[in-house]
Amino acid sequence: MKIETDLKKAYSDRESVIALGKFDGVHLGHEYLLSELLREKEMGLQAVVIAFTMDLSEGRLSTTEEKAELFQKIGVDVLIECPFTEEIKNMEALDFLKFLRERLKMACIVGADDVCFGRGRKGNAALLKREEGNFGFRSVIVPKKKEQGRDISSTWIRQEILDGHMENANHLLGYPYYLTGRIIHGTGLGKKFFHRPTLNLVPHKDKLLPPFGVYLTETEIGGELYSGISDLGVKPTVSKEHVLGLETHLLDYQGNLYGEMAKTSFLMFLREEKRFSSQEELREQIENDTMIAKHFFGV
């Protein structure tokens, strides 16, 4: 998959089908829309996604790298990451369509029924249908996919994660929500409590974080998947520095993984992070958490 980071410089010599959207998380609703993109691809068109990126104070469901990986798995040919700048925001809707037709040879455009683009959000599904003949493209308008009686949206999923409702968030995403990072050295207490090192990683600065606490997790390292229990937070009982991190105890692995890339998926929230009165009290709680995790995973 080809990745472009500047829409103005993007060019194609092949006729394309283009999907527009923010696509944060590339969730089940997005996949429903992208299935139409892939249907057009099967007819010989190049599958292009223009993903508008905006600043989100609470964080994103997917980093730029994660989003690219998800699109590649789906079968997108070209991903154009498009920051929602003032220039893009103020471009007239018809000028935007002209640009797509001339620069990317847009033969078909796919959008949700609430698609909007251009100055004053004047570019919408009705405008796309109206301008098909004038610009020489087809438009495919896809209704929003619903779940539990409401539209699946990134906003809904972000709130579920912020509330710690990981099972429902994962259901709406279509995959378990995850954090990725390189395994680094921690405080060394993992070896003291578990008789083996724990995995420590620092979450990406742009990533949305669930509530601080303990979670049942699965961690992928080098293509292998391991069951575990993870603590997300600042470790108030053992650290005065309050450094944010994710610490994971793997239930079924022993070895040295420092320096490896890890992908830790959140399956279920167990309890909030808290400050214990002593390390012994913390150790007892960790033993109890581990018993729950072993029962959950059947190990």
Image (spheres, rainbow, N blue to C red):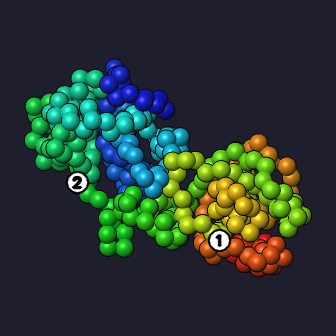
Query: Circle 2 sits in a helix, a strand or a loop, which is it?
Result: loop
Indicate whether 43 appears above or below 181: above
- The residues bearing labels 1 and 2 have C-alpha atoms spaced at a distance of 42 Å
Residue 277 in view here: yes
**137 relative to 274 in the view: left or right:** left
In the drawing, what numbered circle is on residue 289?
none
**158 relative to 253 in the view: left or right:** left
Q: Position of residue 184 (x, y in %)?
A: 75, 47
Query: Circle 1 sits in a helix, a strand or a loop, which is it?
Result: loop
Dot 2: few (<14), some (14–19), or many (≥20) neighbours within 10 Å? some
Q: Within the image, what quadrant is residue 212 found in?
A: bottom right
Residue 101 in view here: no
Look at label 1 and name its amino acid. Answer: Glu
Q: Position of residue 175 (x, y in %)?
A: 53, 59
Look at label 2 and name its amino acid. Answer: Asp
Image quarter of the C terminus: bottom right
Q: Residue furthest front?
A: 240
Q: Position of residue 159 (x, y in %)?
A: 43, 65
Q: Residue at x 74, y 61 (%)?
A: 239
Q: Earlier in the sequence, mark 1 or mark 2?
A: 2
Pick the residue in front: 63 or 206. 206
**125 relative to 246 in the view: left or right:** left
Pick the residue in front: 240 or 172. 240
In the drawing, what numbered circle is on residue 113?
2
Between disc 1 and disc 2, the foreground one is: 1
Q: Which residue matches tag 1? A: 273
Q: Residue at x 23, y 23 (%)?
A: 102
Q: Position of residue 232 (x, y in %)?
A: 64, 62
